């Protein structure tokens, strides 16, 4: 793989007055590969996130949103390479590039505390053979050496109480929890270290509508209570994003094609891809019913957007 | 709670079992009566499906909606005869198929196909997609040339080409691609009835619309009857003629799509609809 030269990391910001800015992401380029056939998954993405904001990152499968999330969470591992990009957070500029094992080691102190990841398929992240309390202790111990089991559990108990969740889940095994509860438990564990920024990758995709609602309400409460200061919420589910996010970024073929305040972007999309994406949403409305009836009568719908086509 | 007892009345009827039934459709191709499934668990039993009676008229789409654990998938598995019913009957083309076996069951399966929610568990990982699809056709007695044509046609329905799908092993495909192959595999058998259990759950919005459009088209052109199981009420709204709402194994409301979605009577249906995220609403600013 022909790794591009890493741009020199900008000097630390030095000044604290950034008008409520939590994080600034600049020029992220991530590729999959290791030889001639590199595939650029994220192509020069830059973002800004304010204190207490939730940024929704939407797009279809393969558009690069999960790769961008992994890059920001600093968990990129071969065959994913981050060629360039910086994350400016808390007056610190973190070089996101992962061109050598040393880079991966350099990112370790930031993982979990500065940026934490709520991964895709988090429901399968709980070991079926241990109780939740053991997982809590393992996570705390992995990031903070010397933390006792009691300290870890006290912290988890406080957090569960704060979020009005039953403390008894700590004594449960994964199979004793519903899908929605598993997802909320893993969200609590992902944020035990009070990360400044949470990257939530498709946290609601496997949930039914009631569980989805409980999870997004919990995330909103967590931001409200400043358990974390901002969230990048990655999903292809636009209705969920429109409910929870302050800003929306629409991603296609590795780039952000449109970004803006959620309400404005939903009501007045400018980019053709955003318009197509929004037109594909099926919500239970008279308009959707009429579209379905049209199709059932043999009418042709508007062609659906395609990531491949856009590439 | 039989269909005949409810009649074609447009006004909601709250029957003895608490289920709200509105208008009903015509003669059923597939139906079930008082279908029940009880699982034994430590210290007792759980009734996953409790006396469900539903009709599937030919060329119609019935959506069964409800939350996780409401019994939707168990109902589908019983209708598909993959799981024995504890009690109740299943009728297909006026024949009781509740306990058929052997050749009769194989004939039933040739007409009633399914697509399940977990595309990761639906493939044998040791074979390419091509060999899996060809094997299905071979078992159904389809000649190779005709089979290749069918495979190309049905992959085309779901936006795939033989070139990008057939030589791949399941682990080399994304969840969405596998789900599309599963839909193609089911359609390839030219079924009369398709049981789609969260068949589009792993697809992006645009691909989802494409697959739903394929079902619309096949119903329009070939008279396909569809049982569409989903927790996404928007999809039910787009595709279904009728909707049945399940809660804790019981059908709590059923009727035309318009009746159930736009004028729900059951409290559970109202709550389910209230929880659907609104593209133009904002939970954030109301929280």
Image: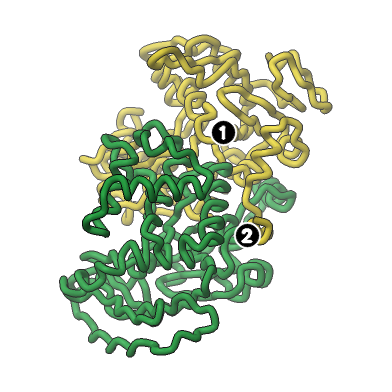
Chain colours: A green, B yellow
Where on the picture, by quarter, is residue B81? top left
Q: Residue at x 42, y 58 (%)?
A: A201
CB atoms at circles 2 and 1 under 8 Å apart? no
Q: Residue at x 65, y 54 (%)?
A: B278
Q: Secondary structure at mark 1?
A: strand
Report the residue at 37% width, 62% height from top. A116
Is residue A67 visible in this depiction of the protein? no
- The percent position of residue B67, horizontal first and vertical second, equals 55, 35
Q: Residue shown at 40%/53% (left/top)?
A: B160
The label number, if any, that marks residue A148 in the structure image: none
Above or below — where is B148 with respect to A51? above
Nearest to viewer (mark 2 / mark 1): 2
Q: Position of residue A233 (x, y in %)?
A: 48, 62
- Image coordinates of residue B5 in percent, x first then y, are 75, 13
User: Foreground residue, B250 or B85?
Assistant: B250
**Label placed on residue B284:** 2
Q: Identify the residue position indicated by label 1 in the image.
A: B226
Q: Nearer the viewer, residue B191 or A97?
A: A97
Residue B270 to residue A263: above or below: above
Residue A16 against residue A132 in the figure, above or below: below
> As displayed, is residue A33 above or below residue B34?
below
Label whose residue precedes the other's in the sequence (2 or 1): 1
Which image quarter holds the N terminus of chain A?
Answer: bottom left
């Amino acid at each position: 793989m022909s790794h591009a030269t890493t741009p020199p990391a900008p000097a630390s910001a030095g000044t604290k007055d950034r008008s409520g800015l939590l994080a600034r992401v600049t020029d992220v380029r991530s590729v999959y590969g290791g030889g001639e056939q590199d595939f650029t998954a994220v192509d020069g993405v830059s973002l800004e996130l304010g204190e207490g904001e939730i940024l929704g990152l939407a797009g279809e499968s393969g558009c690069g949103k999960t790769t961008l999330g992994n890059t920001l969470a600093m968990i990129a591992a071969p065959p994913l390479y981050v060629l360039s990009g910086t994350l400016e957070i808390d007056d610190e500029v973190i070089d996101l590039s992962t061109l050598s094992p040393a880079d991966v080691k350099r990112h370790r102190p930031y993982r979990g505390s500065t940026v934490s990841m709520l991964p895709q398929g988090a429901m399968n992240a709980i070991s079926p053979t241990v109780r939740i309390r053991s997982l809590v202790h393992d996570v705390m111990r992995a990031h903070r050496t010397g933390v006792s089991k009691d300290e870890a559990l006290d912290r988890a108990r406080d957090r569960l109480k704060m979020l009005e969740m039953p403390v008894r889940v700590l004594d449960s095994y994964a199979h004793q929890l519903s899908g929605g509860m598993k997802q909320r438990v893993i969200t609590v564990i992902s944020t035990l270290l009070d990360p400044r920024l949470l990257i939530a990758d498709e946290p609601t995709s496997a949930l039914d509508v009631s569980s989805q609602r409980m999870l997004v309400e919990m995330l909103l409460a967590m931001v409200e209570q400043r358990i974390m200061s901002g969230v990048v919420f990655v999903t292809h589910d636009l209705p969920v994003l429109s409910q929870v996010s302050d800003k929306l970024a629409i991603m296609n073929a590795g780039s952000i094609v449109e970004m803006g305040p959620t309400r404005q972007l939903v009501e007045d999309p400018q980019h053709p891809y955003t318009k197509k994406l929004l037109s594909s949403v099926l919500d239970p409305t008279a308009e959707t019913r009429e579209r379905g009836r049209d199709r059932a009568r043999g009418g042709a719908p508007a062609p659906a957007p395609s990531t491949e086509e856009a590439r | 709670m039989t269909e005949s007892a409810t009649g074609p009345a447009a006004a909601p009827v709250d029957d003895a079992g608490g289920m709200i039934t509105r208008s009903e459709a015509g003669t059923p191709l597939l139906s079930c009566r008082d279908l029940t499934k009880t699982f034994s668990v430590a210290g007792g039993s759980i009734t996953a499906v409790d006396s469900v009676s539903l009709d599937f008229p030919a060329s119609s789409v019935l959506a069964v909606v409800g939350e996780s654990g409401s019994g939707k998938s168990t109902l589908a598995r019983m209708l598909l005869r993959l799981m024995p019913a504890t009690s109740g009957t299943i009728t297909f083309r006026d024949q009781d198929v509740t306990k058929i076996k052997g050749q009769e069951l194989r004939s039933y399966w040739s007409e009633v196909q399914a697509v399940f929610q977990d595309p990761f568990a639906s493939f044998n990982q040791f074979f390419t997609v091509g060999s899996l699809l060809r094997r299905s056709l071979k078992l159904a007695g389809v000649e190779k040339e005709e089979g290749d044509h069918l495979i190309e046609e049905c992959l085309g329905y779901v936006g795939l080409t033989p070139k990008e799908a057939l030589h791949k092993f399941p682990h080399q495909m994304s969840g969405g691609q596998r789900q599309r192959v599963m839909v193609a595999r089911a359609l390839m058998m030219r079924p009369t009835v398709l049981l789609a259990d969260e068949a589009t759950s792993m697809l992006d919005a645009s691909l989802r619309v494409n697959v739903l459009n394929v079902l619309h088209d096949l119903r329009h052109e070939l008279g396909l009857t569809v049982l569409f199981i989903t927790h996404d009420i928007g999809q039910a709204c787009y595709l279904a003629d009728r909707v049945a709402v399940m809660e804790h194994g019981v059908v709590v409301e059923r009727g035309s799509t318009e009746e159930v979605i736009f004028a729900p009577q059951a409290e559970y249906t109202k709550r389910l609809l209230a929880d659907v995220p609104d593209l133009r609403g904002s939970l954030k600013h109301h929280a």
